[in-house]
């Protein structure tokens, strides 16, 4: 069975579900229904959420399974929170800025001292 459409395939506008039917008894219900917030997740994000739940939220286990850093996982969790429509405001922005600084250190663009100074300014 296919996933519910999240947007109009013609214009990209928002869609609503107007009819659902039972595959067992053929009962049909007509109305105006919104898809659930999880249905709207991109496939990659939904797979990440499944992995997160399967690992009981243990980021260390996710690091091992995915082979990516803690900070990348934290960033993806923040993206997931945003995709689900939950607002985490300034904390998300700070976390994103911290991650960017740390990635610049690992990429050789910044020294540890420069990073410490930048991180200190974010407080």
Image: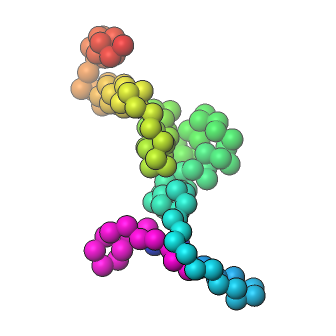
Q: Quadrant of residue 122?
A: top left
Q: As drawn, is 79 to the left or to the right of 39?
A: left
- Span highlighted in magenta in the image: 6-19
What residue is shown at x 61% (from left), y 53% (from top)? Answer: 50
> From the viewer's perspective, is residue 81 above or below residue 45?
above
Residue 25 in view in this figure: yes
State the residue in front, 56 or 24.
24
Locate the C terminus and report the quarter of the image it occupies.
top left
- The foreground one among 114 and 29 is 29
Residue found at the far bottom of this picture:
26
Residue under the point 41% across and 71% down: 15
Instruction: Indicate the position of residue 23 as horizontal and vertical percent values.
Output: 70, 85
> What residue is rendered at 43% in x and 44% in y?
82
Horizontal and vertical percent for residue 114? Answer: 27, 14
**Is residue 83 part of the magenta span, yes or no?**
no
Q: Residue furthest left?
A: 109
Q: Quadrant of the N terminus?
A: bottom right
Position of 111 compared to 85: left or right?
left
Q: Position of residue 61 (x, y in %)?
A: 63, 38
Q: Looking at the image, which residue sits at the far front?
A: 31
Residue 22 vs residue 10: left or right? right
- Magenta region, main secondary structure: loop
Query: Residue 7 in magenta?
Result: yes
Q: Quadrant of residue 110?
A: top left
């Amino acid at each position: 069975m296919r996933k519910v459409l999240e947007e109009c395939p013609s214009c990209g506008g928002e869609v609503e579900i107007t009819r659902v039917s039972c595959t067992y008894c053929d009962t049909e219900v007509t109305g105006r229904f919104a898809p659930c917030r999880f249905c709207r997740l991109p496939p990659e994000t939904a797979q990440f959420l499944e992995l997160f739940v399967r690992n009981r939220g243990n980021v260390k286990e996710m690091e091992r399974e995915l082979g990516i850093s803690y900070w990348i996982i934290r960033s993806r969790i923040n993206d997931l929170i945003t995709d689900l429509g939950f607002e985490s405001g300034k904390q998300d922005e700070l976390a994103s800025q911290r991650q960017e600084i740390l990635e610049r250190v690992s990429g050789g663009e910044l020294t540890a001292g420069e990073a410490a100074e930048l991180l200190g300014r974010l407080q």
